[in-house]
Image (spheres, rainbow, N blue to C red):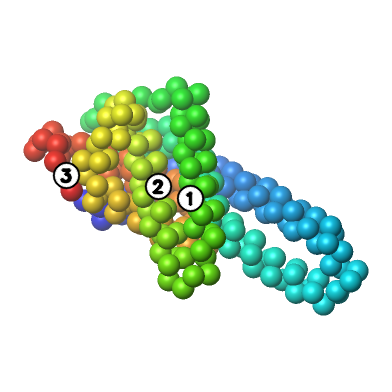
Amino acid sequence: MLVESAAAALRQTFSPPLRAILWKSLGLTLGLLVLVWLGLTRLVQAFQASHHISSQYPILDSLAYYLAGFGLFVALAYLMPAISILVASFFLDDAAAIVERTDFPGDPPGQAMPFGTAMLYAVRFAGVTLLVNLAALVIFFVPVIGIAAFFAANAYLLAREYFEMAAARFRPLPEAAAMRRTFPIRTLGAGCLLSAMMVVPILNLLTPLFGIALMVHLHKRLSRRERLTGPRGA
């Protein structure tokens, strides 16, 4: 079920109906990353200036410059999940509607959540994701544990957010959360796939749109299983 959903989502991500949304999603993701990068570099420059590193220790200034560049790259990787959630919230309904219409034409279409509710939910969860990833960043240099913490935390957070946003087009949010808990293995497996994408440069830019398509397919398949067999785990 997960393999079929992932293959269908990958096909949908580059399909003509979603191509315009793909470019918008990429543009917004890159734009937010650039803004964060500029903000972080200004903080580093302000720190260096306040400690007079340039005037007192030119060699240390050069070393700090290159170390800061690596540090900022790592920081952006840890901020990417929160940015992905925000971007997905902007394009969820348009992208989900296309996926539903093209791959599930016989099913009733989903209903978009009120814009204010959807944004509040996305911003709140993006904030949680940001805090969790900042905590994971603290242990980045601990061998194995740092990467494992990043992967595990984001597998859960991305599975929860993307699946519940997709499911909320067909059921109230509490029911969407309950459905995710009913099928923990499949939803968490999808989250693991999204978390793995996060650590691959360039590919991680596709996460918002791919995640939407993936969870729409997964929700549809799990909904059909519920109708055939009744709710049950895994």
Q: Residue furthest front?
A: 51
Q: Which mark is residue 132?
A: 1
Say which element carries label 3.
loop
SS at badge 2: helix
Q: Is disc 2 surrounded by few (<14), some (14 to 19) or many (20+) residues within 10 Å?
A: many
Residue displayed at 36% across by 43% down: 160
Label 3, label 2: how many angstroms apart (C-alpha)? Answer: 19 Å
The circle drawn on residue 157 is 2
Q: Are there few (<14), some (14-19), or many (20+) residues within 10 Å of tag 3?
A: few
Q: Are marks 2 and 1 in contact (CB under 8 Å)?
A: yes
Side of 110 where 38 appears, left or right = right
* Front position among marks 1 and 3: 1
Give how far across and how far down residue 78 sits, in percent.
Answer: 53, 56
* Residue at position x 37%, y 53% in the image: 155
Q: Residues within 10 Å of mark 1 (few under 14, many from 20)?
A: some
**Disc 1, SS:** helix
The percent position of residue 178, horizontal first and vertical second, equals 26, 35
Checking the image for residue 43, the label placed there is: none
